[in-house]
Image (spheres, helix red, strand yellow):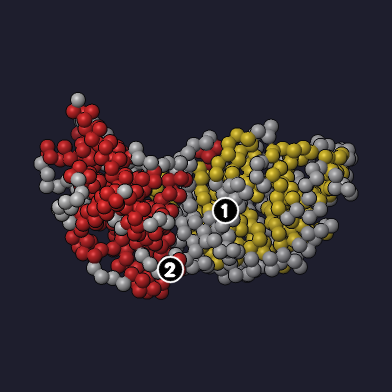
Amino acid sequence: MEIISRMLEDSPLDEAATIEQARHDPACFAPLYERYFLKIYRYCLRRTGQAEEAEDLTSLIFTRALHGLAGYRGGSVAAWLFQIARNTTLNHLQKKGRRYVPLTEDLSLYDTSGEDALDRLIRLENRQQLARLVAALPDDQRDLLDLRFAGGLSAREIGVILGKSEGNIRVALHRVIERLRKQYRHRSEEGAE
Amino acid sequence: MKQTLEQAAALDSYIDRLAKDPNTAPPLNLDRQSATLVRALAELEQGISTGPVEEVKERTWQKVLGTAQTELDAPGELLYLNRVMRRKPRLAMVGLGLVASLAIAVLVISVVLAVFSNNPEPISQGYVTAIPRATPNLTPLPTIAASASRTTAFDSEVMQVAYSPDGKYLAVVTSRKLYLQDRNGQTVKTLSKSDNNSHFVISSKDGQTPPAQLESKPDDSSIVKIAWAPDSQSLAILNGVGTGKSTAVRLWRINEPTDRDFVEAPSPVTDIGWKPDGQRLLTLSQDKGLRFWDLSGQMIVNRLTGDGLMALSPDEKTVGVSSTNGGFNYYEAGALETGQKDALNFGMGGSYKPGFAIKGLAWANDSQTLVIVYNSSLLFMNKIGTFTKQVSFTAGNITSLNWSPDDRYLAIGTDNNQLNLWQVNGENVQAFAPLTRHVAPINSVSWSPDGKSLATGSDDHSVVEWTVPEQG
């Protein structure tokens, strides 16, 4: 199923033309939904930490996108959709009085099939340690990671959303990775001692 | 710097390649630890099993499509979240014992479970769903629902009418004065500005309360809104400042000779109301602060909500708050008052189109239904935040609305001078023939507590009292 989704994500699709059709018939939005659902859902899941909230937000984001097709002015559909996603998620978290909930506990959401028990344990432990480090990052840096990895946006698309250049985004991402790398190593050394 | 840029580009390229092939090898110019970390991050951020996600995907698409195909008066402008009911699984504890007892116990538990499953507990989860499209029957009923029993002329446009909760008085706000009338239509007290605008003057015609002078703030220009305290002994008064609204709310205890400043909000107040227990005044301000005040005028709590209208349900459990941009939110009142952060909050994001806004909110007296006037539609929402029906209104613009005490009727004033009475019975809404007596837009409607009379105030300087016949 994931392979099919990936094929759909990568298949050629005239996104602007699809949006134009969807203005007359909402059902025509389906190919774009198919292409971006998982990215948006992953992003929401990362931002909220809860599957139910992520589902609600995802439906709200796509509904807003469908109702706001007139607001699409060309360019990257991914950037446009994630602009909506980012605003919706930020508003939601602000209303809830929450900043960020790290997704560390609900391990059932992760695909760990095909691993033996020990591999799985080590992998999950490492993942949880990394999740804790990510959770401790400043919000803008976490947002950057979520947009890049969970949302699957390119540096150029993130730049459009955040109003920065592609180069700036690349360097910012590099700095976050570098910071995490140092912290991860520091924790590992502490653990070894 | 150049090295950083190269590393950043290599890292970026690796992330792109990983997204397409999780087993791709890292580029040579990227250090091993960074590559490992990037791979771990990708797994962390993307590692969701696809099984449940496919279900979510299908479910979400149905919701999105359902909402998109709902035609509202302002297509594409209104979004809303509905609270849904979910049945919580309940475990039945069945002990071991005699076979006959066990059979009886199972039977009893089955009945209990069936009862509980019909009373699901709401959970904090929002779904985007469509308003039912069934259009209520708005064919005018043949009978005349009400007849004008008395018309009283006033000095200027009547902006608001409000029966006191005990039914003894009808408060009438004109652009110049506040009148208290008894049920015979006789004015017993007035509150008005002095000739030089320096103070308020209370005059009494009942011979019990002596004329009194009230200090008036220089910026008090006219009364914007009044709200009877539940004990019918005092009125909270919101004054206007020029064309805007004041930050101050005054309190007039109708049997005392003096008025006084009551509360002073930090931002102009847009709406006022009382908690039904009479112990708290609520104000909504342009800074979006919904504030609770005690009777000494001390602010108890301030929560960021909206800057338009507010409506507290009679059971004090929920507050609906609108914003001037057309948005609407719905809160658990208790959580708001105690300052809890997790107050239920379902947004109905509105458009930012001028003129498209929420113009009225009215709770039914049983707290089961909130009616929202959205442009030319009435949206009916139940107590858990689900929209149950939408009724388009074409006979002019709605200026005011009010439920009858028994919630059987909805009185609607319009800018085309008509009073409309709707009979609301579950899913059915039926309209009586519009009532015409006013010759200018109606600004306010108010039911008497016994449900037998209805007062309307209009730009034609008059108040009409209508008698509503009892319906079988």
| Chain ID at mark 2 | A
- Relative to the observer, which residue lies in front, B187 or B219? B219
Query: Where does the image place residue B57, in percent across and percent down from the top left?
Result: 29, 58
For the point 43% across and 68% down, the residue is A73
Query: According to the image, label 2 marks what residue?
Result: A73
Residue type at mark 2 is Arg
Disc 2: CA contacts within 10 A as few (<14), some (14-19) or many (>=20): few
Quote the CA–CA distance across marks 1 and 2: 27 Å
Callout in the foreground (1, 2): 2
Work out which residue is located at the far left of the displayed protein and give it: A116
Badge 1: chain ID: B
Location of residue B276 in the rendering, given as x and y in whole percent from the top left corner: 62, 40
Q: Residue at x 88, y 40 (%)?
A: B211
Disc 1 crowd, CA 10 A, few/some/many (<14, 14-19, 20+): many
Quick check: A51 above or below B335?
Answer: below
User: Does dot 1 land on a helix, a strand or a loop?
Assistant: loop
Which residue type does callout 1 highlight?
Ser
The quadrant in which residue B465 appears is: bottom right
Figure quadrant of the N terminus of chain A:
bottom left
**Secondary element at tag 2:** loop
Task: Please state if A163 lies on the left or on the right of B27 as rendered.
Answer: right
The residue wearing badge 1 is B323
The answer to whether residue B418 of the structure is visible from this angle is no
- Give x and y (percent) for residue B60: 33, 58
Please tell me which residue is depicted at 55% across the width and 37% down the height of the picture. Answer: B337
Left or right: residue A5 compared with residue B122: left
Residue A139: x, y in percent?
39, 43
